[in-house]
Image (spheres, grey):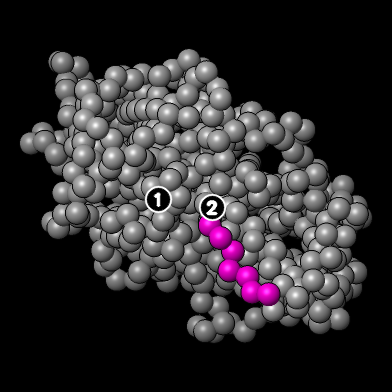
Amino acid sequence: MNWIDLATAPPSDVLQADICIIGAGAAGIYLALQLASQGKSVVLIEAGPTSAVNARSVGFMPSFVGDEYAGAITGRYFGLGGTTSRWGGNLVPHTSYDVRDDVYSSVWGRIASCVKEQSPAVLARFGYTKDAMFEQYAIEKLGSVADVLAKAGLDVQASLMLPFSQKNLLNLLHQTSRSNCQPRIFYNAVAKDWILSNDGKRDNSVRNLLAVSRNGNKLSVNADKYILAAGAIESARILLEIDQSTFQQVLPKDSSPGCFLADHLSLTIADVALVDLKKASRLFGPHFEGNWMRGMRFLKKEINSNSPRAFAHFEFQNESAGFVIAREVLQAVQGHSFPAITVKSLIAGVGDLARLGYYRYIKSRLYIPENTPVNLQLDIEQYPRIENNISLSDENDEYGRRKAVIKWKISSADLGGIESVTNQFLSLWPGKKAGLPDLIPRELNADSRKPYDAYHPVGTCRMGENKEAVVDFNLKVHGLGNMWVVSTGVLPSAGTANPTFTMLCLANKLATQLG
């Protein structure tokens, strides 16, 4: 693979390419490989090193106004693979449950349609060639239990979790390193200056990108098309900087890059009764399908346009010695680092490791010890608010770019939505009378019900045709004739699913259009 460290690269002439992609995380890597396989010359620019590091290490720390948004710090990594070096690898589709009679109905309709159409091709890229059966898998596994849930007003759906060998999308680059069509990848290369041209056309176009390294090395790229795949926060920051880089406004006056920053808010709403822990694990614990793991989640059948989109799932608090060791090793492999395991902990975990192997390869289930605590977790979208936003600071970072300023908080409307949806889910749960695990609701107070963001930033580059939209339904930036954005930021809200799979489906569709 043609990987080049800009910090050590010799001076070069201006690079010419069909397409330049900024950001080598999930979307950037996926797009680079798809477009290169279609015969396009692709340059992929990544700010971080070969192994992903946090925002502070790469010099991308934002400033905060009010609450600190953890999704911009703990949940954000730079380098080849990006945040996929740390994520759980959970692939969950947005569906018709996200399409409601509200201001985002047309956008969610397009998104749900795209996911349904593109998901087989995306999964095939990762080696999963069967029907994912997101709706039918859980129903078939649960049998009559699924009928009980349906009668109570709850739908159960399945998710797919990538095998550990594929969670870090850097591994996709390794797998295709012998391909004839390879993207040129520059790491330690920070997108800095953009040169625009108009040529008498209605929209401006990007003519040239200058990328720099920490030590001052420079890379100049001329491409026909540019794709921002740098994440919801950095992609919005770049658009804001482009828009303010000339005396004449580049983006439409009412366009709102950086605005409506939102996330999923996650919290535990109930605990499974001690006598039902084993039953909960048996019914709803993760299954293996080959190297893929499958989980289950619950959605309300009745769609209420006045209620935030949400889903619930059981969390199994497995902290057995063997599981902790296995998790440490696998996360180290995913992050391309070394596991911190002592001989003492290894000896203590030998028995559990054997059980994990037995359940994994003989029973095709994740081993969960009998007394493992089980909680019901709620993930609910924030209400999109223009007050939650990303703007530009007057202060520059070490690369000479304007720093991002993030204003984000959990509003009283968010807390009210949490209370309402929590009560709805718990009232619908059939419980012991129907042969299901009994749930003990958590007390409704500020300490036990404090939600946290799930590192699923959305809204900053919203898709649509209304005045405030930043990109159109084909992900092209309004006001720029040759720039597209592919990040979770194009989603209008967090919806009823983890956003990465939907982003990959949007990326696959774009790659087909640009190919």
Label 1 secondary element: strand
For image coordinates 40% across by 50% down, the residue present is 78
State which quadrant residue 443 falls in.
bottom right
Distance, label 1 to label 2, CA atoms, is: 14 Å
Choose mark 1 or mark 2, whichever is in front. 2
Mark 1 or mark 2: whose residue is earlier in sequence:
1
State which quadrant residue 209 falls in.
top left
* Residue indicated by mark 2: 336
Give the x, y percent position of residue 393: 18, 57
For image coordinates 52% across by 49% down, the residue present is 84
Q: Is residue 341 magenta?
A: yes
Q: Residues within 10 Å of mark 2 (few under 14, many from 20)?
A: some
Q: Nearer the viewer, residue 470 or 340?
A: 340
Name the kind of residue labelled 1 in the image.
Phe
Give the x, y percent position of residue 387: 30, 60
Q: Which residue is situated farthest in the left direction here?
A: 247
Label 2 secondary element: loop
